[in-house]
C-alpha cells in the first residue's frame, strides 16, 4: 500500500505552465487504484465471510420457518376439514330431526282431521242409514208376516 503522503501528493494543485517543480508531479511509483485498494478489500474478506455465514444461517432459519408454517397449515387444514364435516353432519341431523318432528305433527293433524271428517260423515249418514235399515226391516218383516194373507197351514 502506498504511503499516505504519496496519495495526498496527487491532490496538490499543479502550477500553471511554465516552470517545472516538484509540486504536482506524479510520484515515481506507478500504482493503480486496484493496487491501492487491494489491502482494503483483503481486510473485507473476513467481513464477507461473516456475511456469507449470516446469509446461510438466514436461509436455514427461513427454511425451518417455512417448514413449520407448512406443518401448521396442514394441521389447520385438517382441523378445518374435520370441523366442516362435523358442522355438516350436525346440520344434516338437525334438519332431518326438524323434518321428522314436522312430519309427525302433520300426521297427527291429518289423523285428527280424518277422525273429525269420519265422525262428521257418520253423523250425516246416520239418518240415511237409519232410514235404509228401517226400510230393509220393514221389507223383511213384511215378507215373513204378510199382512192380511192367509197362512197355508
Image (cartoon, rainbow, N blue to C red):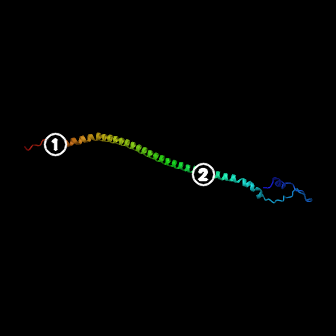
Q: Is residue 72 left or right of residue 22?
A: left
Q: Quadrant of residue 32?
A: bottom right
Disc number placed over residue 152 in the picture, else none: none
Q: Quadrant of residue 112?
A: top left
Disc number placed over residue 142 in the picture, else none: 1
65 or 73, which lies in front?
Answer: 65
List x then y, in percent, for residue 96. 41, 45
Q: Is residue 87 above or below residue 33?
A: above
Disc number placed over residue 60 in the picture, else none: 2
85 or 151, which lies in front?
Answer: 85
Quarter of the image that includes the C terminus: top left
60 or 1, which lies in front?
Answer: 1
Q: Is residue 49 left or right of residue 77?
A: right
Which circle's residue, 1 or 2, is located before the other in the chain? 2
Q: Secondary structure at mark 2?
A: helix
List x then y, in percent, for residue 44. 71, 53
Quarter of the image that includes the N terminus: bottom right
For image coordinates 36% across by 43% down, the residue present is 107
For image coordinates 53% across by 49% down, the residue present is 71
Amino acid at each position: 500500500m502506498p504511503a499516505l503522503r504519496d496519495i495526498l501528493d496527487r491532490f496538490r494543485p499543479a502550477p500553471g505552465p511554465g516552470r517545472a517543480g516538484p509540486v504536482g508531479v506524479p510520484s515515481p511509483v506507478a500504482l493503480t487504484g486496484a493496487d491501492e485498494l487491494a489491502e482494503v478489500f483483503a481486510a473485507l474478506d473476513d467481513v464477507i465471510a461473516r456475511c456469507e455465514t449470516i446469509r446461510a444461517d438466514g436461509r436455514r432459519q427461513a427454511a425451518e420457518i417455512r417448514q413449520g408454517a407448512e406443518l401448521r397449515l396442514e394441521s389447520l387444514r385438517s382441523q378445518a376439514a374435520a370441523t366442516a364435516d362435523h358442522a355438516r353432519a350436525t346440520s344434516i341431523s338437525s334438519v332431518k330431526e326438524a323434518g321428522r318432528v314436522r312430519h309427525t305433527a302433520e300426521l297427527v293433524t291429518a289423523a285428527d282431521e280424518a277422525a273429525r271428517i269420519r265422525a262428521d260423515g257418520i253423523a250425516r249418514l246416520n239418518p240415511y242409514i237409519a232410514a235404509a235399515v228401517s226400510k230393509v226391516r220393514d221389507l223383511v218383516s213384511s215378507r215373513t208376516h204378510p199382512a192380511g194373507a192367509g197362512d197355508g197351514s
